[in-house]
Image (spheres, rainbow, N blue to C red):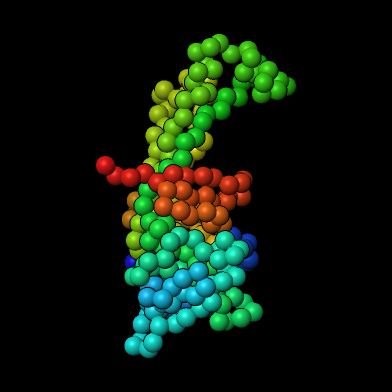
């Protein structure tokens, strides 16, 4: 599954850069190209070992070959708030080395702290109507009856569920065309993400759909920055700005 995920991620990153590419003629050429792009990812994964603190991180790479644990200095990363999560022995870490000094880490993410269900409350907006053209938002709201104003204050809960093996899915109230069409408000569209990964310190969220033949096809890809990760809070910066999430604990 990991190999398939990598190729899916490569396709998505290619869409992001907007670079033109020569059509792949055969499977071998396709694999060579995918492997080449995967190697461009500066993110390394490892398991945290005893000795980690605010100054150093000690870890074993996931492709462990029997060698001693590796050690990286994280003092600058800690000061710049680029260590996300609380490192514990055995945690899976995503690490980006400093480009100028390979003995330092520029960013460390505790992957185990990212896993789980993260939720956000979203509010609706007024559905566009011809008779409201040219009015400001305040003027539009002032003309609404109280019953519709109340609808604008009713949130919906959207959730992002990060799982092992780079699996991601989203949850939220499904749009009911027969009822929502007649409502004067509409909620933001919820992307159906299916995969996640780190690429050079940024979090990649891949929206995909499965066709009638069972093949997963990329719909869109979002590259977001991790801004905050605590036991109960997550903040991601998308192109349209930061979004805050709270962890949902299963009862």
Question: Relative to residue 10, is residue 70 depicted above or below?
Answer: below
Where residue 99 sits, quadrant-wise, is bottom right
Residue at the image point whose x is 34% and y is 61% from the top: 164
Residue 229 vs residue 131, the one in the foreground: 229
Quarter of the figure that contains the N terminus: bottom left
Q: Is residue 92 visible?
A: yes
* Along the viewing direction, whichever of 117 and 204 lies nearer the viewer: 117
The location of residue 129, given as percent across then percent down, is: 61, 20
Would residue 205 be found to the left or right of residue 132 on screen? left
Name the residue rendered at 55%, 54% in the picture.
227
* Image coords of residue 29 (percent x, y): 48, 78
Q: Nearer the viewer, residue 211 or 221?
A: 221
Where does the image place residue 21, in percent across and percent down from the top left? Answer: 59, 69
| Tally of marks | 0
Above/below status of 226 relative to 144 = below
Q: Quadrant of the C terminus?
A: top left
Identify the residue at the far top of this view: 145
Q: Is residue 248 left or right of residue 76?
A: left
Residue drawn at (58%, 50%), measured in percent from left and top? 238
Residue plotted at (40% across, 38% down): 172
| Residue 194 seen by the camera | no
Q: Nearer the viewer, residue 78 or 205?
A: 78
For this orientation, the residue located farthest to the left is 251
Picture coordinates of residue 37, whole percent (x, y):
53, 74
Residue that extends furthest to the bottom in the rendered view of this protein: 67
Relative horizontal placement of residue 98, taking residue 3 as reference (left or right)? right
Location of residue 141 by image quarter: top right
């Amino acid at each position: 599954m990991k190999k398939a995920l990598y190729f899916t991620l490569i396709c998505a990153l290619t869409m992001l850069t907007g670079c033109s590419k020569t059509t792949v003629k055969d499977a071998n050429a396709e694999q060579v190209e995918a492997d080449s792009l995967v190697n461009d990812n500066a993110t390394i994964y490892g398991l945290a070992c005893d000795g980690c603190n605010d100054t150093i991180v000690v870890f074993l790479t996931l492709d462990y070959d029997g060698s001693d644990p590796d050690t990286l200095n994280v003092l600058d990363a800690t000061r710049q708030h680029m260590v996300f999560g609380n490192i514990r022995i055995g945690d899976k870490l995503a690490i980006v080395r400093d480009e100028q000094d390979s003995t330092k880490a520029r960013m460390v993410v505790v992957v185990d702290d990212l896993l789980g269900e993260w939720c956000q409350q979203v509010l609706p907006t007024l559905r566009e109507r011809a008779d409201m053209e040219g009015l400001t938002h305040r003027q539009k709201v002032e003309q609404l009856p109280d019953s519709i104003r109340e609808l604008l204050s009713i949130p919906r809960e959207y959730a992002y569920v990060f799982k092992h093996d780079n699996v991601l899915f989203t949850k939220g109230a499904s749009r009911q065309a027969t009822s929502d069409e007649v409502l004067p408000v509409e909620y933001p569209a919820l992307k159906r993400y299916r995969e996640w990964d780190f690429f050079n310190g940024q979090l990649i969220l891949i929206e995909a759909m499965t066709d009638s033949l069972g093949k997963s096809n990329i719909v869109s890809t979002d590259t977001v920055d991790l801004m905050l990760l605590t036991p109960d809070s997550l903040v991601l910066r998308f192109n349209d700005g930061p979004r805050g999430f709270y962890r949902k604990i299963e009862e």
